[in-house]
Image: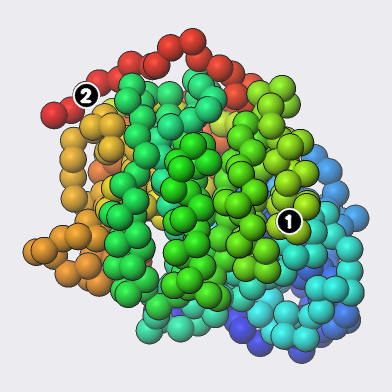
Amino acid sequence: MTKRVKLECIEPLRKKGAPIIIVAAVREAEAIANACKENGIKISAFCDTEKRKTLEKFCDLDVVHTPNIPNKYPDARFIIASHHIIDVENQLTEMGYNEFYSALKLFENYNVENYEYRISKSYMKSRIDSYKKTHSAYFDDTKLYMRSVDIMVTTKCSMKCESCSNLMQYYKNPQDSDYIKTIESLEILRSHVDDISEYRIIGGEPLMNKNWSNIVNVIIEKNPKRKVYIYTNGTISPKEDQIKNFNGKDVNFIITDYGKLSRNVDKLTELLNKNEITYVRTPAENWLECGTIKQHNRTVEDQKEIFKQCCVKYVYTLLDGKLYRCPFIANANNLKAMPDNPSNYVDLFSKTDSVQNQLKRLMNVAKFFPGCDFCVGRPYDPTSKIGYDGKGMITPAKQSKEILKYKLYK
């Protein structure tokens, strides 16, 4: 595959030329901007496909909505802050641009400790480490690399959000994932993938599974260089003996704060502070209605467009021994809310198909999945209505009084 993104960036970007734009106003873009200043590279603006990010400045610079870049910067050079390198280069190439750079070289001598950020220094370091691995994998076609895998340890949840994007609102009999099968699945996956940077423990509410900390400890033992993120809604504070082994092991809590619904969030953060475990606490916001299960009977081209626009198509999700590309298809298939189709996943316990070949197909070949037809879409920019037919932005975490109904395929 021809590499349109360039690795060597410092000297070319120091030279006079077209304005320089950093692509994606993500957390690590702040560090890229700092590194540019250190190296005498002048940044003109940021751009982002999420229109909401254009409402305020980022690092004291304007954030331009990516579709509007040609109007403001008809000629430009781009530094890619996004981990989705191929998506960015394809989008910008279609818009007529041809000069793209990775920030890998900018990070070679960058010291996180020299700056303050919107996030903690430890979390910024984790973000930059993942960036380095993702961009390095782009320049090395010989390896199978996954930035992250979501390990779904339960479909039980302590909240009842009627528009949950992971479809918890449809489970009549939510269950914890089988502990032994989960551990075996992780070992099979680890043996077939060259590197996985992040293991993300999710649900439902993962702390409802009594074995959640045991799963984390196994990951720590088997993969000492990995990062672990535990996604929780702040309704449960674990026992201290469940987390005491996490200190210094690059285990991080990602806490979504739902206000009064997150009834134990202060108790949880107090416990994490006491044990010196890193966490990020953010309010619930920017919810897009994408929890509806509906068959669309789209054309192949429309399916490709839905997949192209999707912002979660790299959210590898492990559920019941199967690896999917997104949590929607994982749970829709688990609920039997769509016909079972092996093209939607990799069965890690398959006795007939090569797991290695199936992983390559899932990660590098597929242009869309049959399950995409049951999703309303989850685009980076829902305001454009490209690849989306849902209701748009909604109030976060509206609670449902009952389990929602759906069509069951047998």
Look at the numbered disc 1 and give the secondary structure of its residue.
loop
Which amino acid lies under the numbered mark 1 shown in the image of this protein?
A: Asn
- Which of the two residues, 62 or 205, is positioned nearer the viewer here? 205
The C terminus lies in quadrant: top left
Q: Which mark is residue 156?
A: none
Snapshot quadrant of residue 392: top right
Q: Residues within 10 Å of mark 1 (few under 14, many from 20)?
A: some
Disc 2 designates what residue? 408
Residue 99 lies, in percent from the top left, at 63, 74
Asked if residue 372 can be seen in this view, the reply is no
Identity of the residue drawn at 72% across and 50% down:
272
Identity of the residue drawn at 48% across and 49% down:
212
Residue 23 lies, in percent from the top left, at 68, 61
Residue 401 lies, in percent from the top left, at 49, 10
Which circle's residue, 1 or 2, is located before the other in the chain? 1
Look at the picture and state if 21 lies above or below 230. below
Asked if residue 326 can be seen in this view, the reply is yes
Task: Report how far apart the C-alphas of labels 1 and 2 lie in the structure.
Answer: 45 Å
Nearest to viewer (mark 1 / mark 2): 1
Identity of the residue drawn at 32% across and 75% down:
191
Disc 1 designates what residue? 275
Identity of the residue drawn at 45% across and 64% down:
218
Look at the numbered disc 2 and give the secondary structure of its residue.
loop
Look at the picture and state if 200 lies above or below 168. below
Snapshot quadrant of residue 123: bottom right
Which amino acid lies under the numbered mark 2 shown in the image of this protein?
A: Leu
Residue 53 lies, in percent from the top left, at 74, 44
Q: Left or right of 212: which side holds 383?
A: right
Give the total of numbered labels. Answer: 2
The N terminus lies in quadrant: bottom left
Snapshot quadrant of residue 114: bottom right
